Image: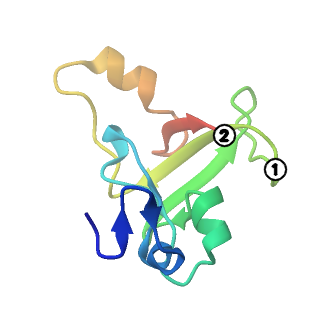
Amino acid sequence: MPHGCNETGCRENEYERCHIAYGLTEGSPVMTQTRTFDPIEAKVSTVGKELPEIEVKVVNPDTGIECLPDEQGEMLCRGYNVMKGYYKNEAATVRLLTKMAGFIRAIWV
């Protein structure tokens, strides 16, 4: 158990060392993460910001147009972390990877 923690939780200052990260197997290991200096409110209510050399955007899945802040859409990711494809499964690769300049479909937000 981490220092300062017990069965009922951690002391408030222990959360300062916590990070939230989001990723998926096809975009391994993660594509976004909170930062050490982020306020606790951001750490518990977001998945942080994109990591260096990784592009993340949210688009309307029907039009491909980038969404405005607070608008629901599909999260896309492009970068060194994105897989090339599923081994010997071209159909699954085509279903997952978009034709949008190397972006991978990540999640609905």
Q: Earlier in the sequence, mark 1 or mark 2?
A: 1
Q: Is residue 52 above or below residue 30?
A: below
> Residue at 29% of width from left, 43% of height from top?
83
Measured as percent of width and height from the top left, residue 75 is found at: 59, 43
Query: Which residue, given by chain and number where applicable, does mark 2 sit on?
Result: 109
Q: Quadrant of the C terminus?
A: top right
Q: Is residue 87 rendered to the left or right of residue 36?
A: left
Question: Is disc 1 placed on a helix, strand or loop?
Answer: loop
Amino acid type at circle 1 is Asp
Q: Is residue 38 left or right of residue 6?
A: right
**8 and 73: which is toward the camera:** 8
Horizontal side of residue 104 vs 26, given as left or right: right
- Viewer-nearest residue: 35 or 79: 35
Give the class, few, some or many, for how many residues have Cα within 10 Å of label 2's Cα (few <14, many ≥20): few
Q: Residue at x 48, y 74 (%)?
A: 11
Check the image and report above or below for 89 versus 84. Answer: above
Q: Which residue is mark 1?
A: 70
The secondary element bearing badge 2 is classed as loop
Quarter of the image for the N terminus: give it.
Answer: bottom left
The residue nearer to you, when weighing 13 against 36, is 13
Question: Whole-percent x and y of residue 44?
Answer: 60, 60
- In the picture, measured across the screen, residue 94 lies left or right of residue 57, that is left
Packing grade of label 1 (10 A; few <14, some 14-19, many >=20) is few
Q: Position of residue 90 (x, y in %)?
A: 28, 20
